[in-house]
Amino acid sequence: MPRSDPSRYRARVTRPADFDLFWERLLEKAAAVPLCPQVEHVPMRSTDDVDVFAAHFDSLDDVRIFGWYSVPRDRPGPFPALLYVPGYLSDPPLQKAWSKRGYAVLSVAPRGKIGSNTQYNPGYPGLLTHDVVDRNTYAYRGFYVDAVRGVDFLLSRAEVDRNAVGVFGSSQGGGLSIVVAALHRAITAASAGSPYLCGILESSELTSTYPYYEIRDYLRTHPEQCDAVAETLSYFDGMNFAPRITCPIIVNLGLHDNICPPETGYAVFDALGSSDKKLYPYDQFGHDGGRVQHDPVIEAFFEKHLHGHSTNLGIT
């Protein structure tokens, strides 16, 4: 529950001078890894109106990444595309409902998630603090890049409209939506729900729940590493990605969220660089961010910004 008016909260996150350079170099390194995209049709998960595929592609450090890819069946393309990015504990779900609406959707499983955990698996809890004292080995270094590479997978598909690509998710998925929209120029529109990974250290003080409590656990055990942890996290904090975003974006918050504090949700919204942004705060809602009311808002948002393109292309 908010301690005071969360809209008045001001974040204390410091942006490293070499923040942009760090990510430019890391994305250049990832781009040097051939994507090697593959899809395999999954009849059991497909329906009369949606085809479902098991998708794989290569990412940073040659880690093979899995995702569920779904497209409208027997309908002309190209299709507007969506990248769904997952929450902290959840594994990427099928997004057939979106494909029924006419979208090609990749529900990506960054390293450590089921389907992408044979080469790298820090566990849950554990991801938030795995190698947290070094920005060059920190768990989210590869995790963020895997999400960004999900956009490259979508762009590799002939049935995808390259000019209509969106990203969405909630909680960790909300934070990842901000990261992806900040790092990939192909993103046309973004929806971030109850964004996690924003004001990371401050959130660990504002709430006493996991996953942010992992930081308290870690620093209680390793108090001498406080400065190193703060420095590393500054390269991965959504507050520092937000000013890079220029595409249309919507953000929804639950004002009684005890997992991702609404204070930092307001702060990251204020930091967004886009001139086309809108915040949806929902009173009497918690970490779900008012989903029952907000889902139609997301649908209308992507309909406005992504739909309306058609050419006779089919999936291959």
Image (cartoon, rainbow, N blue to C red):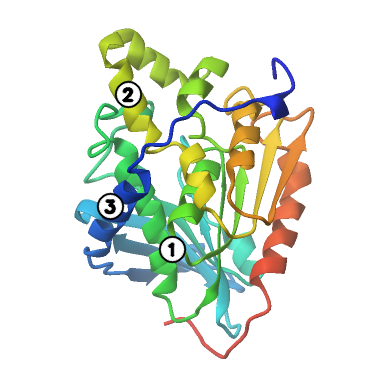
Q: Amino acid at mark 3?
A: Leu
Measured as percent of width and height from the top left, residue 37 is found at 31, 69
Disc 3, SS: helix
Q: Amino acid at mark 2?
A: Val
Asked if the residue under mark 3 is in contact with the one under mark 2, i.e. CB atoms within 8 Å, the reply is no
Disc 2, SS: helix
Q: In what quadrant of the picture does the N terminus appear?
A: top right
Distance of mark 1 from mark 3, alpha carbons?
16 Å
Labelled disc at residue 314? none
Q: Residue at x 75, y 53 (%)?
A: 297
Label 2, on which residue?
A: 229
Label 1, on which residue?
A: 151
Q: Is residue 206 left or right of residue 218?
A: right
Examine the image and state in which quarter residue 291 appears.
top right
Tell me which label, 1 or 3, sits earlier in the chain.
3
Q: Residues within 10 Å of mark 3 (few under 14, many from 20)?
A: some
Tell me which label, 2 or 3, sits earlier in the chain.
3
Q: Residues within 10 Å of mark 1 (few under 14, many from 20)?
A: many
Camera-nearest residue between 249 and 124:
249
Q: Is residue 47 left or right of residue 52?
A: right
Label 3, on which residue?
A: 26
Disc 1, SS: helix
Q: Residue at x 27, y 12 (%)?
A: 222
Q: Residues within 10 Å of mark 2 (few under 14, many from 20)?
A: many
Q: Is residue 28 above or below residue 206?
A: below
Tell me which label, 1 or 2, sits earlier in the chain.
1
Q: Is residue 251 visible?
A: yes
Q: Amino acid at mark 1?
A: Val
Examine the image and state in which quarter residue 289 appears.
top right
Distance of mark 1 from mark 2, alpha carbons?
29 Å
Q: Residue at x 72, y 44 (%)?
A: 279
